[in-house]
Image (tube, helix red, strand yellow):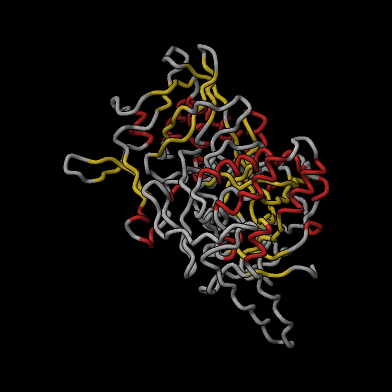
Amino acid sequence: MASATPVPAAMPPGPPASPSRSPSDASATGSAWAAAPSAALRAAPLLAVLLLAACVPAPPPGTGEPGAEAGVEAGERLSIVAGEFTDLPGWAEDRHAEALPALRASCARFATLPAREALGGDGVVAALAGVAGQWRPVCEAAAALPDADPAQARAFFERHFQPYRAQAGEPWEGRRDGLVTGYYEPEIAGARRRSARAQVPLHGRPRDLVEVDLGRFRPALAGQRIAGRLDGQGQLQPYPSRADIAREGLDGRAPVLAWAESAADAFFLQVQGSGRVRLAEGGTLRLGYAGQNGHPYVPIGRVLVERGEMAREQVSMGSIRAWLAANPDRARALMDENPSYVFFRELRGLAESDGPLGGFGVPLTAGRSVAVDRRHLPLGLPLWLETADPIGGAPIRRIVLAQDVGSAIRGPLRLDLFWGTGAEAGRHAGVMRNPGRFWLLLPRVQAAAQAPSPAPTAAPAGEAPAAPAPASAPASYAPAAGASAPAAPPDTAAPDTAAPDTAAPGVALPLPPLPPRRR
């Protein structure tokens, strides 16, 4: 597009990025973007439980398989290209007012952060996203909008936000096609008290579970965590695996919040990390992620493929459930192949219509919340998503909010779409593995504060294009009119926050604290 201005997201440029691929390169996502998702893609699994690890708990870094997914390149950086709303496919057709509740939820979270706390992200994205306090004018305008006026909602986004196309690699030749998977909130049958029907415990967090953020001890290990328990000599030892817990229990070290009627239901509830339990005594119990035993996540769909029990293209959440039901004498052993075990906490104060709490600490909105890799994208940001429904192939073109994380959601163009609660949401999430593109919607007040680099000049035939001069990320950002520019936040994380991402020189990127969350 003639109006597009590339904005490099590495400051200063680091090592060469992985080779980028054009949208027509089928190797990027398994099919060209212009083509409809193939049958193989539509039949592909929910990454969480199948051949790859999906949105598993943020704390344990080894649960996912970064780099194993199509369209994900290790070491890629995010770059962005400024555009116009007319560049966004289907922009005029979205129901913009439906995105306002999710945006207001992000605003409520921004309001709890220190005004000078940087939202984080990769390079220039961090500079343009700014600090929490700078979102106040946008959030106040969003709060004043009527809920059901689509014209005003669209005008609000166009007035307050600047769209930037997301790419991986260099701005002028970066890969645009990413990978979009899905997840959901399960709803299972259970009881508060153990009974003949409800025999499978859903454990709360053990009192002896110790989780360690390694980045606080070694900067090179930022984002990596381990978990275990202390022995009598004060040494950290591995926590019991799934098989150990099933065989020996936890000897009273962890409360049992409820009892599930189905071992398979309890397993998939742990994979998703949050859910609802329909209680035999009446009512519904909401459970959220509270911790994990520190063991790596092993996708049992991959185990079935390796054993020759199932072809790769057959793997889906439904096919795994069918296998477990058809092989009750082998089901426990298969589930125990995944040593990861998730602990829950009871969620109180959520309305029936609220989704589970995401990694940003706000209830997720069905169809409007996504999980992202927070090394590249700040949490809370609105995005414009372009992908397709895995069932039927209808286009999905809408505003979504980055409100969750997952250890297997790795890479600058990697998103996980929250489909909602219950079986129908699970039906779509369970087969979603589609190519997708997205645009960042960044507040114009921040965009004006960061002058974008010019587009590369045309190079003579046979020569590489000249790289634009790298943008410099200021240590403070332009505030709203009448306010003074806030200083850069400190470069050390508070004791209860995650370790900062690696930042460009002069820019501190402390991350917002992560509450207990799904998967």
Instruction: Give me the residue at 69% from left, 65% from top.
Output: 81
Q: Quadrant of the N terminus?
A: bottom right
Figure check: 471 above or below 260: below
Res 394 seen here: no
Residue 428 x %, y %: 67, 37
Instruction: Give me the residue at 57% from left, 26% from top.
Output: 187
Q: On the rendered structure, is 265 left or right of 245?
A: right
Figure check: 49 above or below 21: above
Q: Quadrant of residue 479?
A: bottom right
Instruction: Give me the residue at 41% from left, 33% from top.
Output: 343
Q: On the rendered structure, is 270 left or right of 353?
A: left
Figure check: 281 above or below 231: above
Q: On the rendered structure, is 31 left or right of 320?
A: right
**Closer to us: 452 or 6:** 452
Q: Residue furthest left?
A: 233
Residue 313 x %, y %: 63, 45
